């Protein structure tokens, strides 16, 4: 995705009242990342963190919107490339002027890349319909409950390990992560999913849910090739720190609604 196309999408998103300021920003001479090359920003379709806007065709999302602000603030010339995740990781490994987002920052991964973060706080959680009254604070509180979860994945394994000694817990494996409707067709009492992804899926299915228990926490960030000049990474981190510090990051999170909330996702995203 070119800078020019991204700029047009930004202007549509900002609205007419901010066009003069935005044009001034984008008319600035871009700074090359390294060796006269644009910074290659790799990502995948992963709503609500990163996905293509159905109306504009632009890359948007909870993480993508923050990355766009980072690029605005630093003025670094860049291009986006949306690829399957394994292919994106392979491109990152052989490309000095490349970064990838959104990727979980773990102790194992930390020495492999240079990092810009946090872009978002994620993890896994349990969700229920709004009428669910039982309080869930520990694994023992899940006794006797049915939990819908995507079958065969790491989250199912995590739940089986967590509830191994809890009586009467039934895991209901689903074919896909988007089967949150199991809460409303009598198949399950709770739904296990991503802290941000599950509410997004619920909004898409128009079924309101609330978070009842956080299972894990993770930090999503941008990972850059170790050969990218550290000064470039430092500039991006400083820009992100500014975006977090002045409230713009929080505004983006409200735009997509916070984990576990039920809001007007997709409508409030374009509010000024």
Image (spheres, grey):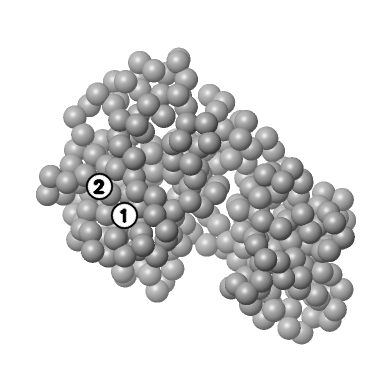
Image height of 239 relative to 165, above or below:
above
Image height of 156 relative to 39, above or below:
below
Decide: few, some or many residues near mark 1? Use Cα within 10 Å; few <14, some 14-19, many ≥20.
many
> Which residue lies at the image location 36% right of the left edge and 59% below the top edge?
88
Decide: few, some or many residues near mark 2? Use Cα within 10 Å; few <14, some 14-19, many ≥20.
many
Instruction: State left or right for residue 3 relative to residue 142.
Output: left
Image height of 7 relative to 160, above or below:
above
Upstream in the sequence, badge 2 or badge 1?
Answer: 2
Instruction: State left or right for residue 100 relative to residue 35.
Output: right
Which residue is labeled 2 in the image? 39
On-image quarter of the N terminus = top left
**Mark 1 secondary-structure assignment:** strand
Q: Residues under labels 2 and 1: Cα distance?
A: 8 Å
Instruction: Evaluate whether residue 96 shows in this view.
Output: yes
> Which residue lies at the image location 82% right of the left edge and 49% below the top edge?
130
| Dot label at residue 109 | none
**Mark 2 secondary-structure assignment:** strand
Q: Residue at the far bottom: name it.
A: 165
Residue 262 location (% of width, % of height): 72, 42
Instruction: State left or right for residue 72 relative to residue 29.
Output: right
> Which residue lies at the image location 87% right of the left edge and 50% below the top edge?
131
Residue 27 sits in which quadrant? Answer: top left
Residue 192 location (% of width, % of height): 69, 63
> Which residue lies at the image location 81% right of the left edge and 57% below the top edge?
183
Residue 23 location (% of width, % of height): 32, 20
Q: Contact (CB < 8 A) between labels 2 and 1?
A: yes
Residue 111 sits in which quadrant? Answer: bottom left
Residue closest to the eye, 83 or 14: 83
Residue closest to the eye, 130 or 50: 50
Residue 243 sits in which quadrant? Answer: top left
Which residue is labeled 1 in the image? 99
């Amino acid at each position: 995705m070119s800078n020019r196309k991204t700029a047009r999408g930004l202007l549509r998103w900002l609205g007419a009242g901010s066009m003069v300021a935005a044009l001034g920003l984008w008319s600035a001479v871009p700074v090359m990342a390294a060796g006269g090359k644009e910074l290659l920003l790799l990502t995948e379709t992963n709503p609500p963190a990163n996905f293509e806007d159905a109306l504009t065709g632009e890359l948007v999302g909870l993480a993508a919107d923050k990355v766009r602000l980072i690029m605005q603030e630093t003025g670094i010339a860049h291009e986006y490339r949306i690829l399957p995740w394994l292919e994106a990781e392979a491109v990152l490994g052989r490309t000095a002027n490349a970064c990838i987002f959104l990727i979980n920052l773990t102790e194992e991964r930390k020495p492999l890349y240079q990092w810009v973060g946090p872009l978002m706080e994620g993890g896994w959680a349990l969700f229920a319909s709004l009428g669910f009254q039982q309080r869930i604070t520990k694994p023992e509180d899940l006794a006797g409950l049915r939990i819908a979860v995507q079958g065969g994945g790491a989250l199912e394994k995590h739940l089986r390990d967590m509830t191994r000694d809890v009586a009467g817990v039934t895991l209901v494996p689903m074919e896909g992560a988007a089967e949150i409707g199991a809460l409303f067709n009598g198949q399950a009492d709770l739904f296990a999913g991503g802290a941000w992804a599950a509410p997004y899926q619920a909004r898409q299915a128009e079924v309101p849910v609330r978070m009842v228990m956080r299972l894990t926490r993770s930090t999503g960030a941008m990972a850059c090739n170790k050969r990218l000049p550290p000064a470039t990474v430092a500039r991006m981190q400083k820009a992100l720190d500014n975006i977090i510090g002045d409230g713009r990051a929080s505004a983006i999170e409200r735009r997509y609604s916070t984990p576990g909330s039920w809001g007007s996702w997709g409508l409030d995203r374009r509010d000024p």
